[in-house]
Amino acid sequence: MAHHSLSFEKPILELETKLKELRAFSEAQDIDVSRELSDLERKIVETKRQVFKNLTAWDEVQLARHPQRPYTLDYIGEICRDFVELHGDRHYGDDRAIVGGFAMLDTEAVMIIGTQKGRDVKSNVERNFGMAYPEGYRKALRLMKLAAKFGRPIVVMIDTAGAYPGVGSEERQIAEAIAMNLREAFLLPVPIIVTVIGEGGSGGALGIGVGDRILILEHSYYSVISPEGCAAILWRDRAFASKAAAALKLTSRDLLKAGLVDEIIPEPLGGAHTDPKGMAADLRRRLLYHLRELKQYSLDELLDRRYRKFRAMGVIRAESPSAGELTIKNEE
């Protein structure tokens, strides 16, 4: 796949181009420019640090959507072994936008489920651009219940702009399918770890997003609506997407501050797509850490903590009724 660059990466790309040109010149002319190369390499690293330290919310959204970013099956291939994919919802069909099956995560036998995008036009059509139909959510629920039957923990990876919003989805009751998943996930008697690895869009993400631990990669986002959708509603113009992204407080740091996620997993400098193997290794370590921690709880403790975790989200208390100031307080 050809390299895809984002607008804020322009200063970095200019320096990297100069570095390539200098190396080519050095080889062609047989001139030692090692000192200049080292200086330029250090400048590239420092520029990257400065750029990625000052990303806007809209920049983060663009990174989360990067076409070279690792997807669910990429991570499964790196962190799991003996993956056996399971298909179909036993009611309508097999939605390829959601994948899942049993696998081994280190020494832990787990059920792993996630949304899956395509890499080109053909695979994106096959995967419906990672936007699941109702049968996708019913497949996910079937696999979750199968995991519960065999006492296997569930690992979920979210990367979707949202559930598919077309006529077919409405005809097959997309809202009911997502609502059913929300209800049933709270009752599953096994640990559930959810990780947002890219886009976390609306009910499409929440339909497989109930868990005992909610993790998010550093440059991912999780939002009730896409920035473009929000801009179209509030300003009647999708051109205000960057303004909407800032208002939605959808970045990993915003979500952690609001208590909507439990942990941010740092990405390699430049994003997960710059070092997929390193990112997968870090994700694997954090999944195993949380999985082993959750397995220490009894079933009653696990379900009670899961219930209280979500009940505490979005609790608003008036600090000063006379002043009308509101603060968000998250309670365990």
Image: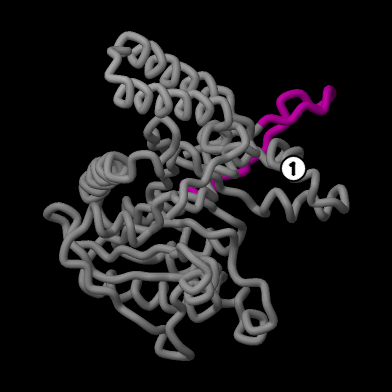
Asked if residue 320 is among those painted magenta in the image, a careful observer would answer yes
Q: Is residue 250 left or right of residue 235?
A: left
Residue positioned 58% across, 31% down in the render: 10
Q: Position of residue 134 (x, y in %)?
A: 54, 78
In the picture of the structure, the residue carrying the numbered disc 1 is 244
Residue positioned 46% across, 37% down in the render: 218
Q: Which residues are magenta?
A: 309-327
Screen quadrant of the N terminus:
bottom left
- Three-letter residue code for mark 1: Ala
Nearest the eye: 312 or 15: 15
Question: Which residue in the rendered view is the most extreme toward the right?
Answer: 236
User: Callout 1 environment at 10 Å: few (<14), some (14 to 19), or many (20+)?
Assistant: many
Asked if residue 65 is among those painted magenta in the image, a careful observer would answer no
Q: Position of residue 90 (x, y in %)?
A: 40, 89
Q: Is residue 149 left or right of residue 135?
A: left
Q: Position of residue 75 (x, y in %)?
A: 31, 54
Question: Which residue in the rendered view is the most extreme toward the bottom?
Answer: 91
Residue positioned 53% across, 74% down in the render: 125
